[in-house]
Amino acid sequence: MEYMDPPVWNLDQLYRQGGPELAADLAALKDQTRKFTAWRARLRNGPPSPMEFRELVTELAALNRLAHRLSGFSNLAFAQDTQDQKAQALMARMNEEMADLANDLLFFEIWWKELDGDEAAPLASALPDFAYWLGRTRAFRPHTLPEPEEKIINLKNTTGGDALLALYDSLTNRYRFRPPGAEAGVEVGRDELMVHVRDAAPAVRAEAYRELYRVFGADGPILGQMYQTAVRDWRVENLRLRRYGSPMEVRHKANDLPEAAVAALLRTVRERVGLFGDFFRLKARVLGLSKFRRYDLYAPLVEDRARVDFQAGFEDVLAAFGDFSPRFQSLAARVAEAGRLHARPRPGKQGGAFCYSMLPGDTPWVLMTYNGRRQDLFTLAHELGHAVHAQLAGHHNIFHFHATLPLAETASTFAEMLLAGRLKSQARSERERANLLFHLLDDAYATIGRQAFFALFEIKAHELTENGATVDDLADAYMENLAEQFGGAVEVSPEFRWEWVSIPHFFHTPFYVYAYSFGQLLVYSLWRRYEVEGSTFVPRLTDLLSRGGSEAPEKILAASNLGPLDETFWRGGFEVIEGFLEELKDLEPQSG
């Protein structure tokens, strides 16, 4: 099969907008829900037998599969065109349907959490294939409210927090930008603009960033208020109502990670962030820059204006997967072969990239915007790595096949390392090899240093918002955050005070970002093993990924002889970064 142009996925495989299949499945979901709610009366009479409990959980899993398919379709339809009013209306309706469903099913979750431990244990033992999910559900018992209150929260979210986030997406995804050097009237989307921040010309990089934050900055006070509202909503629900000890504890609990492990991660990054400063100073010298500006962070050593057509780029990515494992290659290829890859630039398309793993055993959906630059190859490899991960874990049930956030970036980041290794081996000169090392170090900063400091900013922003800070106060705090992470090695221009309002994760998934730092440092440990063990390492990584979210992250890592997750572990990842930097210094590349 040939892929001459960036493809567009085919959502008709799921449903047609307004088609009879969509209406039929919504009706089926309601019927299945009514049937399931009959368990409420049966549970009042006492705990079910192990056989009855398996029947109950099997029905619940089937309900969730159908709900994931329906809500997944609405999310994908919105992502492909955030300005499509039908897609907007469908997503709003589906959010309401899913809130109603969550309320209808809530009785089981609350019953299971409140069940006496002596009664719950034999039931959980009878369902070993659901054991981790059942145990994790009971772990949230201290933070669960009475059923009427939980229902109110679910309903209010559809017109409150969820609606606010949808509005943020609709607003920011309609932004248009004038690319550097373009004639008046020429406008592009954010992803197309961001191609220019990796341009070889300093003026082009600067112009692209100025344009990005000119547009976001114009709405900065409004976007900032939206963020503060999302923060207050998070704090009201989770701290005042659910009695979590801190805003970040909510994420630790969801990730099933001890707070100490994340604290050790953030401390280590803070201690070693000067290593990135050393890299930026080297980069400035190599590029012949008297001062290294935030605009120059991702400047290439070698100017690369050649456009890589999609077919050639896609084949390079697949070949990198194949160098590691033919199985990885075939699973990655399946995404495009199944018509589930959307890579074509289009107005209104959601910015960024994602892999949507909807159902176990099903081929995932991948969205990214392919503009023909080398960075796009790494984005494609990253998202296809997610797709491989999901397919390897596809034998698990609906509650176990998604990896928890700390491990969710393992396959995707490892895939980028595979691509970098292949491109480095094919480099025709020391300059090309050095350029790839620059890319690896750029990526190390972006995924470890940048994301960890994002998390540190979120901690501060939640605290400031609780204490009545203004939007300008948060912007000032963000500039202080940048000053600490760059340590004088990078000059930061004033417009970057609005960078934080352009980060969707801050709005949608508070404290998500430390998972990137976690995943990258973990992958460096895995990569070191692969370099030593070669092909014998392939089954080890395959096993790790195949576990999906069926066990706690620490247990999955322990099975691969990794951990404990303390400062020593995280420093090991920085040793790989030091190796990249020393290798780059030995090459002593010169700009030109």
Image (cartoon, helix red, strand yellow):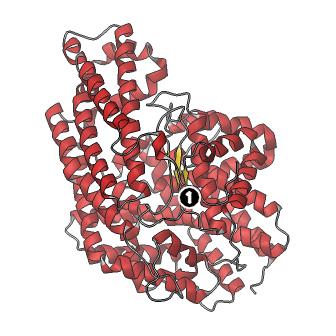
Which residue does the image show at 73% across and 79% down from the upper left? 302
Q: Which residue, as the protein is rendered here, is positioned at the far right?
A: 428
- In this rendering, does residue 490 appear at all? no
The correct choice, above or below, for 46 with respect to 451 in the image is above
Read off the residue under disc 1: 343
Which residue does the image show at 44% across and 16% down from the upper left? 127
The secondary structure type at the circle numbered 1 is loop
Occupied quadrant, residue 164 = bottom left
- The quarter of the picture where the C terminus appears is bottom right
The one of 234 and 468 positioned closer to us in this rendering: 234
The correct choice, above or below, for 245 with respect to 128 in the image is below
In percent of width and height, residue 393 lies at 57, 34
In percent of width and height, residue 355 lies at 51, 49
Task: Please tell me how crowded label 1 is: few (under 14), some (14-19), or many (20+) other residues with Cα within 10 Å.
Answer: many
Relative to residue 274, is residue 102 drawn left or right?
Answer: left
The one of 86 and 513 positioned closer to us in this rendering: 86
In percent of width and height, residue 297 lies at 58, 77
The one of 304 and 136 positioned closer to us in this rendering: 304
Q: Which residue, as the protein is rendered here, is positioned at the far bottom?
A: 290
Relative to residue 126, is residue 204 drawn left or right?
Answer: right
Q: What amino acid type should be assigned to the residue bearing mark 1? A: Ala
The correct choice, above or below, for 514 with respect to 156 in the image is below
The correct choice, above or below, for 378 with respect to 256 in the image is below
- In this rendering, does residue 130 appear at all? yes
Which residue does the image show at 36% across and 76% down from the upper left? 216
The one of 116 and 329 positioned closer to us in this rendering: 329
Which residue does the image show at 46% across and 71% down from the upper left? 190
